[in-house]
Image: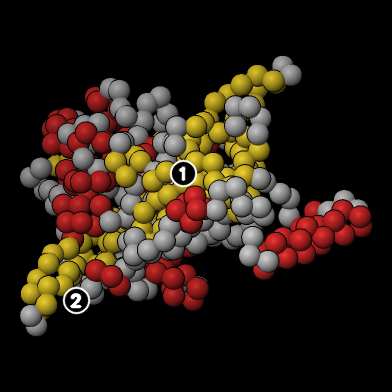
Amino acid sequence: MESSARLEIMDAILYDVPTTVIERQLSDEIIGFKPSDLLTHLKQNNWYNELAMNWIGWPKTEVEGTEVEVAEYLNKLADFSRSVLGDLPCSPQKRVYSGKYANTVPLSHTVRNPDIVIVDLKVEEATKNASWTQIQGVGGLKCNVSDPLENTLEQLAQYVGLCYGHQYDRRFVMTFGIFNTNVSVYYFDRSGVYATEKFDAHAKPELFLRVMMGLLFADRSALGYDPSFTSEIVVENEKEIQKNYVTVSGSRLEITDVINQECVVLGRGTICLKVKDEKGNILVVKDSWVDQSRRDKEFELMAKVVGVKGIAQLVKHEHVKVNGKPDDTSTVRAFMMETIDWKGKLVERWTTDQKWIHFESIELRDHYRISMTPFGDSLEDFDSLEELVLVGKDIVEGEAFFFSGC
């Protein structure tokens, strides 16, 4: 992995998190089926040999270059599973695994070759390659069980950064690694990544189904997409077009442009969008993940200067909620922490292999969103010399206003 990506995540990784976290993130309710019930059907239809404890027809993951074969096997397993499960949370969309991008590059300005990706079937069947806006999940495939975990995490961090940089509605990205027959789940969000313990796909078939089928069958929000971003197809001038929307504190705003978005994993992950309200007013929406230890929140400061000339004006703000609960990066990690008495002082520590990394060493973040006005074009977008001079005049007047004590 490139040094920039290595430096970004190296101090924010929690290793060997118990696999019970998978049952939290991909519960029966979320994935829409009980792995034990599905496994019963698979045993009866020659997919899994209970006596030998192995998956029948398992691809040769002990050799390199089997990305396409692994994806095809998983897709066939998914097709059979759909035939016995019926309606699923992801319906009517159908997601599939694709291994073709290990040898061809997804559409992007950056050359990256993910081993396995998750995309909608209609994207996979299209004549052109998928773009990073369409890739819903990524996975690493290693033929050696002892391949260093750090290498896989560094590689996946690049792909996660590209997902964040092309999908403004992404809250987190759940990825996976297959090491011959061992599997691990890696959960990336704005606070870092946690890596579960590896488990053998043959020895723990139900857990394998929960992960690999769950990622295909669950609702998009379980893969990290923000349900407060929506889209619809409308007809304008006899043409069908897609319109995208974001909700801020109950107000539905049409997204007309992306002002700022970056391919980074950790930190605030600030995204700025140009939007239009129902009355046609142009606003700016700022979406970011704020460090919980930060004393002053941006919307609180903006509320204090409402009406002050030369300052962006707050319209609405919210702590983003998902399924009725405040969105943050701490809830998913809460069960990984404990409070102990250390040298006469109560301290919090992680219950993973990194237990002596204190709570505050990983920045836990809350998801906030604000809308504000007015919107202005970038300074370099002036149309004439006169317009440039007027911009300079406004800057000087604004500075003079503040230095004069408002």
The secondary structure type at the circle numbered 1 is strand
What type is the residue that disc 2 sits on?
Trp
**Is residue 122 depicted above or below 358 in this figure?**
above
Residue 388 left/right relative to 118: right
**Is residue 387 depicted above or below 348 in this figure?**
above
Residue 375 left/right relative to 163: right
Q: Position of residue 130 (x, y in %)?
A: 56, 44
The quarter holding residue 227 reads top left
Q: Is residue 7 visible?
A: yes
The secondary structure type at the circle numbered 2 is loop
Q: Nearer the viewer, residue 328 or 202?
A: 328
Of tags 2 and 1, which is closer to the observer?
A: 1
- Which residue is drawn at the image coordinates 68% and 66% (left, top)? 404
Classify the position of the C terminus by image quarter: bottom right
Q: Which residue is mark 1?
A: 317
- Which residue is drawn at the image coordinates 13% and 36% (left, top)? 36
What type is the residue that disc 1 sits on?
His
